[in-house]
Image (cartoon, rainbow, N blue to C red):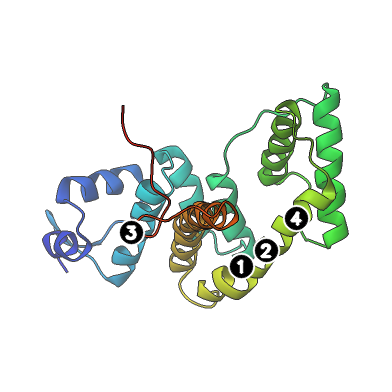
Amino acid sequence: MRISQLSAESGVPIPTIKYYLREGLLPQGDQTAATRAEYDQSHLRRLRLIRALLEVGRLPVATIRKVIDAVEDERLSVHDMLGAAHYALSTPVEPHPEEEDWRGARELVDEMVADLGWGVHPLAPARDELTQTVVTLKRLGMPTSREDLLPYATAALELVREQDITKIPFDGPRDVAVETLVICEVLYGKAFDVLRRLAQESESARILDAAPCPEGGSQPPAPE
């Protein structure tokens, strides 16, 4: 297909496609003339991946390039390739091992991961993310124990096993597997957060015997 058709089928403007080509995010097409190249379904798949990383994952171009390098490196296992995407989506956290609160929280996180038998790399960014969360909870007057975190860990594992992982085509094209992981982690993660808020509102109404509004939620306070 010509670049105009690639643009039409992908929904990505031609100037944007040319930018991805210049940046090396999208492989060059087969040159058929001095000013003409042909593209195929692999280019469509790659555009979907780029858009997922850019628009859903909100990743900068430099980080997207690292993920795509992992996709293209056939020496990397599928697990390591998906790990590159996982780590790219993580929120950067600066460790503070010199602080007592940080050391205690990190010990709690590492012990819980080990007790659960989870195969997580010692340097996985998510360990630092969870550590920072535990530190913040303590400093807000809500110290957190393993027993507090375990129900969330159990629910997370169940969701991942029964939902997220079943959607990822491990034996399909590598870029499709990464695209699916990004969509599941970001968008289904967002859906889960929203559903929790809806459930919290519903439970508050039930416990406090509050009358729901016609749309199904508690009546919001009237504006002043």
**Nearer the N terminus, badge 1 or badge 3?**
1
Sequence order check, earlier mark of 4 and 1? 4
Q: Amino acid at mark 1?
A: Leu
Q: Which residue is mark 4?
A: 120
Q: Nearer the viewer, mark 4 or mark 1?
A: 1
The image position of residue 77, as x and y in percent, is 63, 65
- Camera-near label (3 vs 2) is 3
> SS for tag 3?
loop
Q: Contact, CB < 8 Å: mark 4 with mark 1?
A: no
- At 58% from the left and 59% from the top, the residue drawn is 81
Q: Can you tell which of label 1 and label 3 is closer to the viewer? A: 3
For the residues labelled 1 and 3, the Cα–Cα distance comes to 28 Å
> Mark 2 or mark 4, which is nearer the start of the sequence?
4
Q: Are marks 4 and 3 in contact (CB under 8 Å)?
A: no
Asked which quadrant contains residue 125, the reply is: top right
| Residue neighbourhood size for the residue with mark 1, other residues' Cα within 10 Å, grouped as few (<14), some (14–19), many (≥20) | few
Q: Of tags 4 and 3, which is closer to the observer? A: 3
Residue that carries the numbered disc 2 in the rendered image: 155
**Please, what is the three-letter code of the amino acid marked with disc 3?**
Glu
N-terminal of the two: label 4 or label 3?
4
Query: Which residue is labeled 3 in the image?
Result: 215
Question: At label 2, which amino acid type do we have?
Answer: Ala
State which tag comes first along the sequence, 3 or 2: 2
Q: CA distance from mark 2 to mark 1?
A: 6 Å
Q: Which residue is mark 1?
A: 159
Q: Say which of 153 and 95 sits in front.
A: 153
Q: Tell me the CA gap for discs 3 and 2.
A: 28 Å
